[in-house]
Each structure stands twice: as structure tokens, then as C-alpha cells.
Image (spheres, grey):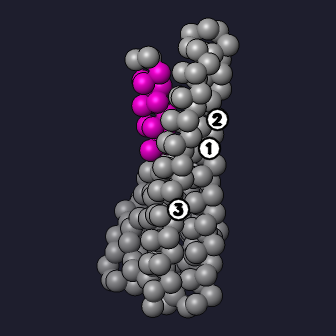
Amino acid sequence: MPETAADLNGLRKRMEGALHAFKHDLSGLRTGRASASVLDSVHVEAYGQSMPVNQLGTITVPESRMIAVQVWDKAMVGAVDRAIRESNLGLNPIVDGTNLRIPLPELNEERRRELVKIAHQYAEHARVAVRHVRRDGMDHLKKAEKDGAIGQDEAHGLADKVQKLTDEYIAAVDQTLAQKENEIMQV
């Protein structure tokens, strides 16, 4: 039994990881305030690999509606500019030498709805990740039962616990999504 308790804790940690990744993705969705974390999801093709913007320059927030990126390598300015424009965040950097100034436009109703759609996509990815963890746990239980390591009744009881854990994390994803949606849609 201690082994299965450890298995449940492992599943809980993996589901917690999916929830944490979802919250991190949501932090990149801006709600009208400038934040350096807006660019966390932007990756640039640089030096033969995909790198986050914060590894290619310094990100600052000089004003409430402006983000500035000081690119360290002059040769990477174009790549950083292109990556930000193509990031689906609706940002258009202004290039000034090795500096990029990124004004944040006012959020209109249409843009708010787009951000909510993106948040829903992130939520669905998180739910799928949680379900994958559940599937792995259920497969492990079936294998243990088949191998005779646990009995049928114990396997059924543990399967119920795995399902309850899954329901708990799906509900946490839904609650987090609802909070972010409310935050985005507030005027």
C-alpha cells in the first residue's frame, strides 16, 4: 500500500505541474497593464535554437503602457522584433537601434474576446495534460492488478481516488480560467 500512496502523490505532483504551467501561460496574457511577463511565452530563433526573449536582452517596463527590450546582440534585433510581432499577442515593437519599445494598445472589446479565447485554449491544454496524468495512473493500476501486485478491490478503490484527484485539478483549472476571464473582461 505505501507504494500506491507514493504513486498517488506522484500523480498529484504531475497534475500540480500542469496547473502551474497553465497559470504561467495565463500570466502572459496581458490585461491592460504592462508587465515583463507578457513576453515570457515569446521564443526567438537565435544561434540555431529557440530561446526566450529574456535570454537575448533586458526587459523593462518604463511606463504603465510600455515594455522595453534592450537586445544585447545587435544581430538579433530583427529576430526579436519578428518573434514579438508573430507571437499572437497583438504587439508591434518600435525598433530604435538595439532597443525595442513595445507600446501596449488599449484593450477594446474585440481584443478582450480574443484574449479570452486564448485563455480557453490554454485551459484546454491544461485539462488534457491532467487527463494524460490520469490515464498514466490508470494504466499503472491495471498493470499492477494484472501482475497480481494489488487486488481487484484495491485497484477499483485506487482508480476512484485517481478520478477524484483528476476532478479536483480540472475544477482548479476551470476556477483559474474563470478568474482570468473576469479579469480580462473588466473594463
**Is the residue under label 2 in contact with that under label 3 (CB below 8 Å)?**
no
Quick one: label 1, few (<14), some, or many (20+) residues within 10 Å?
some
Quadrant containing the N terminus in the rendered view: top left
Where residue 84 sits: x, y (%)?
Answer: 56, 68
Quarter of the image holding residue 151? top right
Q: Is residue 16 magenta?
A: yes
Q: Position of residue 123 (x, y in %)?
A: 58, 60
Position of residue 7 in the picture relative to residue 63 (left or right): right
Amino acid at dot 2 = Arg
- The reply to whether residue 76 is visible in this rendering is no
Q: Could you say which quadrant of the image residue 162 lies in?
A: top right
Secondary structure of the residue carrying numbered label 1: helix
Q: Position of residue 30 (x, y in %)?
A: 47, 75
Q: Which residue is the site of mark 1?
A: 131
Amino acid type, residue under disc 1 in the picture: Arg
Estimate the spatial distance between the alpha carbons at disc 3 and disc 2, rounded to whole Å: 20 Å
Q: Which mark is residue 135?
A: 2
2 and 1 marks in contact (CB < 8 Å):
yes
Upstream in sequence: badge 3 or badge 2: 2
Query: Which residue is situated farthest in the left direction here?
Result: 62
Alpha-carbon span between mark 2 and mark 1: 6 Å
Eyeballing the image, is 116 above or below 106?
above
Q: Nearer the viewer, residue 154 or 170?
A: 154
Quadrant in which the C terminus is drawn: bottom left
Identify the residue at horizontal 62%, vertical 19% (top origin): 152
- Give how far apart the Cα atoms at labels 3 and 1 are: 14 Å
Residue carrying label 3: 174
Decide whether the magenta segment is chiefly helix, strand or loop: helix
Where disc 3 sits, the SS reads helix
Residue numbers of the magenta segment: 4-17
* Relative image position of residue 166 (x, y in whole percent): 54, 44
Is 5 one of the magenta-colored residues? yes
